[in-house]
């Protein structure tokens, strides 16, 4: 059976969540692997959310926020950006590949960008294989 | 007669036991009246296999209170821990090794077999030596905290734990009430002056002494993080403070997190790095980041660095 | 019928061990093993760590002598970074180390070993311990608890942490000593010195006199000795000095700590995780045969008392003279470890006072300038349990690239095995043994304070 990854996408209420909605309204097709969690701001994603998701079986985690300068709360997305480098690097410390995490800017009017981001992430995780690969194979 | 109590040490250094002795003047009444110690290798001669060593199964007497120190590194530790669980009504994990893996769990960040082979082939070791395997307990795949292996009723971290808190927990257990333990961070108990981070944008290694006026109390010294030193107070649970300030800070030395994370399942490395980044400090200035987990490397937190698989080759 | 007696755990010692006594068909001792059960891998997991952090990691090797590991490690990192600690920093470290010896000796003699003597080796196991001593000799027990606490709290108050210390730092010490602190420590140490003298008297009159016959016999073996002595006058040293390796005939060689690889080697047996250190430079190999051991030497208190030419402090020197008059040099009887321990207790108190009275001890310049770099350093101190060697190599970032540790107890693993065998074969004959007899076998181990 082919590997169907589980991907958690933390979407900002003011942009990417609306973009996902719009993608639905337009009946745009995108992989069913993504599970969306709505937040008020990408700056709310504490690194522990990412680590917890991976440790509980998610194969990848996406954070999708507003373009820089467009944050509803002025600078939440800058926070998210500052953290994202750190999160990606720390993933390796905890035994995960950096590619299992991504940060993307998507405005509420860019459903195509949302679809592209999700599609690319799904493809990239499929290539990487399941989280904690060796164990997953034994099961 | 006091409450029957069994003490055991697993992969430990016996610092926790010494901390128990450091309870001080109350110790005598504690070990002779409050408690009735029925098993404790460091203090008394009860044996696993009968007093003449003829038995075949490991046995520990029944007790109301069980106190375990040290992490679980090998099969013997596991067997002893399971026996303790079976025989004790309430099981207390004492010390950071028992609660979060402690220093020995740094081993979890290494390849175990490679390391052990290295240990038995050092410059001073006779050539050709092999890893001992006769009548010595084989290692587990990694170092575990006690609660990864059996149900633990109460945890008291610390490396070593604060004797005052040990006294509080023991008395509480004997009296059948819930002990009062600190739940905030080391910073919360730290009286150093905080003036804002100022120009600090990196953390530095502790190769120079911190700035302070000799002879003055620590509440006149500036916060060590604000002085630019890596100090793990923000991500470490309080409890070490004795004479009015955290132990290491009162020795004018930054905190390294020996009481483990603030929340029981917190992640010291992640929280520390998040704290640095959120305050605009360069997280890459931390040399040897993984050793931020030096006290809480169990629970799968610390793992050998994954050798990267070339992309496209993954199944 | 063949039979194995498993004395596990070996109790009232400071580590994890098991004694297995193998009996043959007639119930006589065929062989004995002291299995060392635990291996944690410090040598490996300090690799990659910034060297200045390592003294705060390796102190966790032992919670009873954390100061020894802490300071040996600091000395090794000093060496690797090419730093010489300031005189005040150096003396503050030594003071903490000898003070830690004081507590350790009180703990070991009174809490762990004394129950065998005060209550008797055959007393029931449920009372043959410190709790039993509280009932049998309440005044003494209270005094002991109080004195150990005093020593421990003095150190704790001055250095922040007595267990798993942090105040020793590469290049010296983390904080200077204030005049009030000095006065308080001095007063406390005086009290401890009085107690130390009382303890030795107590032991001579109530323990050694009473158990003279066992002392001559129990676990007695003939070996060489290794310990630290002053570079100039050959007197007893615990923190800094040269090493002296003595043969059982009393002849010896002196060498510096960083030359250890030329003199000692580590042998591995498949039944103990602990390596067995032996005298490689004697070129006779390694053999634990009781009649003619090869390469075997001992460390710890008795060894230090044997190898030193004298002790630099008066009360301890007087005690040493009495000791040598009775037992000669080198003294071989295993139970004399306890006697030697109490002489060292007095020395540690006297030496602490000496250091506290040194005019520079309250100096402000406690830490030299440190620059992390590549190098190699060997740090040696005398731990309560024997000569402790930390040998580090660092890379250009000042992180550990290689480490070799020789811990005090490991020198004594082979001799302990021999003493166990000697004791077991002496006491167990034709299948007759009892709890008391087996406890005496353990007493042979306990003397070494492993």
Image: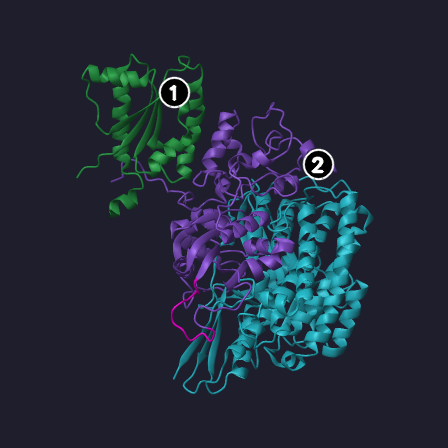
Chain colours: A green, B purple, C cyan
Q: Nearer the viewer, residue B68 or A76?
A: B68
The chain to which mark 1 is attached is A
List the residue tagged with mark 1: A41
Residue A48 at x, y = what percent?
A: 41, 33
* Residue appearing at x 43%, y 47% in the figure: B298
Callout 1 secondary element = loop
Where C413 sits versus C421, above or below? above
* Residue appearing at x 57%, y 34% in the figure: B187
Q: Residues within 10 Å of mark 2 (few under 14, many from 20)?
A: some
Q: Nearer the viewer, residue B63 or B312?
A: B63
What is the magenta range?
B51-62
Q: Is residue C394 visible?
A: yes
Q: Residues within 10 Å of mark 1 (few under 14, many from 20)?
A: many
* Residue appearing at x 65%, y 29% in the figure: B193
Callout 2 secondary element = loop
Task: Please identify the quadrant where the C terminus of chain C is shown.
Answer: bottom right
Q: Are marks 2 and 1 on the same chain?
A: no
């Amino acid at each position: 059976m082919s590997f169907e990854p589980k991907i958690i996408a933390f979407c900002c209420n003011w942009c990417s969540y609306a973009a996902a909605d719009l993608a639905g309204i337009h009946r745009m097709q995108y992989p069913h692997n993504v599970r969306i969690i709505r937040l008020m701001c990408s700056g709310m994603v504490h690194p522990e959310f990412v680590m917890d998701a991976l440790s509980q079986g998610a194969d990848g985690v996406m954070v999708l926020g507003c373009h820089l300068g467009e944050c509803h709360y002025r600078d939440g997305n800058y926070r998210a950006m500052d953290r994202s480098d750190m999160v990606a690097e720390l993933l390796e410390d905890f035994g995960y590949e950096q590619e299992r995490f991504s940060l993307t800017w998507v405005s509420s009017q860019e459903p195509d960008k949302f679809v592209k981001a999700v599609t690319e992430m799904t493809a990239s995780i499929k290539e990487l294989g399941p989280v904690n690969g060796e164990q997953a194979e034994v099961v | 007669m006091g409450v029957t109590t069994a003490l055991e040490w697993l992969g430990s250094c016996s610092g926790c036991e010494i901390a128990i002795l450091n309870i001080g003047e109350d110790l005598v009444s504690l070990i002779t009246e409050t408690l009735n110690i029925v098993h404790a290798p460091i203090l008394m001669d009860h044996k696993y296999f009968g007093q003449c060593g003829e038995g075949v199964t490991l046995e520990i007497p029944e007790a109301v209170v069980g106190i375990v120190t040290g992490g679980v590194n090998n099969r013997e530790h596991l067997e002893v821990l399971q026996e303790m669980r079976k025989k004790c009504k309430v099981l207390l994990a004492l010390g950071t090794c028992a609660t979060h893996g402690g220093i020995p769990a740094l081993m979890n960040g290494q390849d175990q077999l490679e390391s052990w082979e290295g240990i038995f082939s050092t410059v001073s070791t006779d050539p050709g030596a092999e890893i001992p395997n006769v009548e010595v307990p084989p290692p587990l795949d990694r170092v575990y905290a006690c609660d990864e292996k059996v149900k633990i009723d109460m945890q008291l971290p610390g490396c070593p734990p604060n004797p005052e808190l040990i006294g509080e927990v023991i008395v509480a257990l004997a009296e059948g009430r819930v002990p009062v333990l600190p739940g905030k961070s080391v910073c919360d108990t730290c009286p150093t002056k905080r003036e804002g981070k100022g120009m600090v944008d990196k953390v530095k290694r502790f190769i120079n002494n911190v700035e302070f006026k000799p002879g003055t109390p620590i509440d006149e010294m500036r916060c060590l993080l604000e002085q630019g030193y890596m100090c793990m107070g923000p991500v470490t649970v309080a409890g070490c403070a004795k004479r009015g300030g955290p132990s290491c800070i009162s020795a004018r030395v930054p905190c390294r997190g020996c009481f483990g994370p603030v929340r029981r399942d917190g992640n010291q490395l992640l929280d520390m790095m998040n704290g640095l980044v959120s305050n605009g400090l360069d997280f890459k200035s931390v040399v040897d980041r993984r050793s931020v987990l030096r006290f809480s490397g169990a629970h799968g937190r610390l793992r050998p660095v994954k050798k990267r698989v070339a992309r496209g080759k993954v199944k | 019928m063949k039979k194995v007696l498993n004395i596990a755990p070996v109790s009232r010692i400071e580590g994890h061990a098991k004694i297995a006594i193998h009996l043959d068909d007639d119930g006589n001792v065929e062989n004995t093993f002291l299995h060392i059960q635990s291996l944690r891998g410090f040598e490996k997991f300090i690799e990659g760590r910034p060297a200045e952090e390592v003294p705060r990691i390796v102190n966790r090797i032992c919670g009873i002598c954390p100061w020894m590991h802490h300071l040996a490690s600091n000395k090794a990192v000093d060496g690797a970074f090419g730093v010489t600690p300031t005189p005040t920093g150096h003396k503050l470290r030594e003071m903490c180390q000898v003070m830690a010896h004081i507590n350790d000796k009180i703990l070991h003699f009174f809490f762990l070993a004394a129950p065998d003597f005060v209550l008797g080796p055959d007393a029931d196991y449920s009372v043959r311990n410190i709790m039993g001593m509280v009932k049998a000799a309440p005044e003494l027990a209270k005094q002991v608890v109080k004195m150990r606490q005093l020593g421990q709290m003095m150190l704790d108050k001055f250095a922040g942490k007595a267990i798993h210390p942090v105040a020793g730092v590469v290049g010296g010490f983390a904080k200077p000593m204030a005049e009030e602190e000095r006065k308080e420590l001095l007063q406390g140490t005086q009290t401890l010195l009085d107690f130390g003298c009382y303890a030795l008297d107590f032991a001579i009159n109530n323990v050694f006199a009473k158990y003279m016959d066992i002392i001559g016999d129990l676990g007695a073996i003939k070996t060489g000795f290794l310990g630290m002595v002053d570079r100039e006058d050959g007197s007893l040293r615990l923190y800094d000095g040269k090493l002296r390796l003595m043969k059982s005939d009393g002849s010896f060689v002196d060498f510096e700590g960083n030359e250890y690889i030329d003199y000692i080697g580590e042998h591995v047996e498949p039944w103990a995780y602990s390596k067995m250190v032996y005298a490689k430079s004697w070129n006779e190999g390694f053999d634990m045969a009781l009649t003619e051991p090869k390469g075997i030497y001992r460390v710890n208190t008795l060894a230090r008392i044997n190898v030193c030419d004298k002790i630099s402090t008066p009360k301890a020197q007087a005690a040493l003279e009495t000791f040598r008059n009775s037992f000669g040099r080198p003294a071989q009887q295993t139970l004399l470890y306890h006697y030697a321990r109490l002489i060292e207790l007095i020395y540690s108190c006297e030496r602490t006072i000496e250091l506290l009275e040194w005019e520079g001890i309250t100096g402000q310049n406690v830490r030299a300038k440190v620059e992390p770099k590549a190098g190699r350093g060997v740090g040696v101190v005398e731990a309560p349990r024997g000569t402790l060697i930390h040998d580090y190599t660092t890379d250009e970032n000042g992180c550990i690239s290689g480490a070799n540790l020789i811990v005090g107890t490991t020198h004594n693993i082979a001799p302990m095995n021999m003493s166990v065998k000697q004791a077991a074969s002496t006491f167990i004959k034709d299948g007759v043994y009892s709890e008391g007899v087996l406890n005496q076998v353990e007493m042979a181990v306990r003397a070494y304070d492993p």
